[in-house]
Amino acid sequence: MNAVTDTEARLILHRQEGAVAWLTLNRPAARNALSGALMAALAAALDHAASDPSVRVVVIGGAGPAFCAGHDLRELRALAGRDAYAALFAQCSQLMLRIVRHPKPVIAQVHGIATAAGCQLVASCDLAVAADTAQFATPGVNIGLFCSTPMVALSRAVGRKPAMEMLLTGEPVSAARAREIGLINRVVPEAGLDAAVAELASRIAGKSPLTLRIGKQAFYRQAEYDLDAAYAYAAEVMTGNMLARDAGEGIDAFLTKRAPNWTGC
C-alpha cells in the first residue's frame, strides 16, 4: 500500500465510509486550482485507493466554493521555458490517465465551477454528479491559451459539436446543459449533493470488485477499436470473466434468489 505524506494529506482531504474513499481537493482559497503539488497529492491518493482492497469506489470532490478552477495560472506564469511547461502539462495528462486507468470506478462530485483542467477532471472520471448550481467551461480561448489538453477528455465524453462550442466560445454551461450533452450523469439540488453521490457510490460498491475492475478496463479499451475488433475483444473479456469465481457466485445467487457473497476473484 502506498503511503500518503503529510503535505499530500493537507492538499487532499481523505475519508472512507464503508467501501467508498472520498478524496477532496483542498485549496479552497484558490478554487482548488491544480498546482503541481495538488496534482501530485491527488495522484498519490488515487494510488493509495487503488492498492487498498477495502476501497471499491472513489469519489473526487472539492473543498470551499468550487470544484476546480483548472490550472493554477500564477504557477504557470512563474514557470520558465518549454521544458517546465511541458513537464506540468505532462503531469496533468498522466493524472487524467491515472483516473481512466484506475482499477476502481471514480465519481466526480461537482459544485460551483469546474473550468478548464477542472472540466477535464470531470470528463475524465467514470461518472459525475453535479449540483444544480454548478457550471462547466473550457475558457482558455478567452485568455489566449486554448484548452487543448482538456479537449482530449471533453471530446471523448460529449459529442463533437457541443465540445467545439465549449472550446471555441469559452462560455460556461449549466449543470442541466452538461447533463444534456453527456458531460455529467445527474443533476441534483445542491443541498442533496452529498447524499446523492453517497447513494450512487454505495450502490456501485456493492458489486463484485473483480467485475467492476474487468468492466471498467474493457469499457475504455473497446472504445478505441473498430466494431469487429471491439466485439472480438469483448467476447474474450467476457469468456475470462465467466471463469471467475464471482461470476459463478453471482449467477448461482440470482438463480437461487439470494444475495451474492463476493470474494473478488
Image: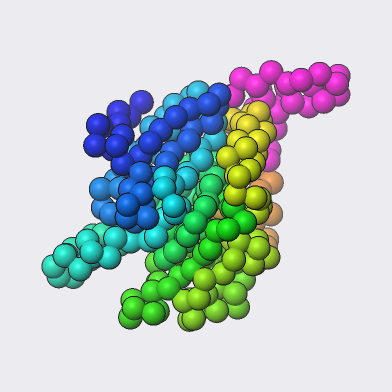
- The reply, left or right, for residue 155 in relation to residue 180 is left
Q: Is residue 246 a member of the stretch shown in magenta?
A: yes
Query: What residue is rendered at 33% in x and 80% in y?
Result: 144
Q: How is the rendered protein coloured?
A: rainbow
Residue closest to the far right: 256
Observer-nearest of 41 and 191: 191
Q: How many marks?
A: 0
Query: What residue is rendered at 47% in x and 59% in y?
Result: 114
Query: What residue is rendered at 41% in x and 33% in y?
Result: 14
Q: Is residue 98 visible?
A: no
Observer-nearest of 46 and 144: 144
> Where in the figure is residue 263, as x and y percent of width and height?
61, 20
Observer-nearest of 176 and 151: 176
- The reply, left or right, for residue 207 in relation to residue 54 is right
The span shown in magenta is: 238-265
Residue 8 sits in quarter: top left
> Where in the figure is residue 164, as x and y percent of width and height?
53, 78
Q: Is residue 54 a member of the stretch shown in magenta?
A: no
> Where in the figure is residue 181, as x and y percent of width and height?
65, 67
Q: Quadrant of the C terminus?
A: top right
Q: Is residue 84 visible?
A: yes
- The reply, left or right, for residue 172 in relation to residue 132 is left
Q: Is residue 247 above or below residue 59?
A: above
Residue closest to the far left: 80
Q: Is residue 125 above or below residue 261?
A: below
Q: Quadrant of the N terminus?
A: top left
Q: Is residue 3 above or below residue 125?
A: above
> Where in the figure is residue 3, as x and y percent of width and height?
30, 28
Query: What residue is rendered at 78% in x and 27% in y?
Result: 251
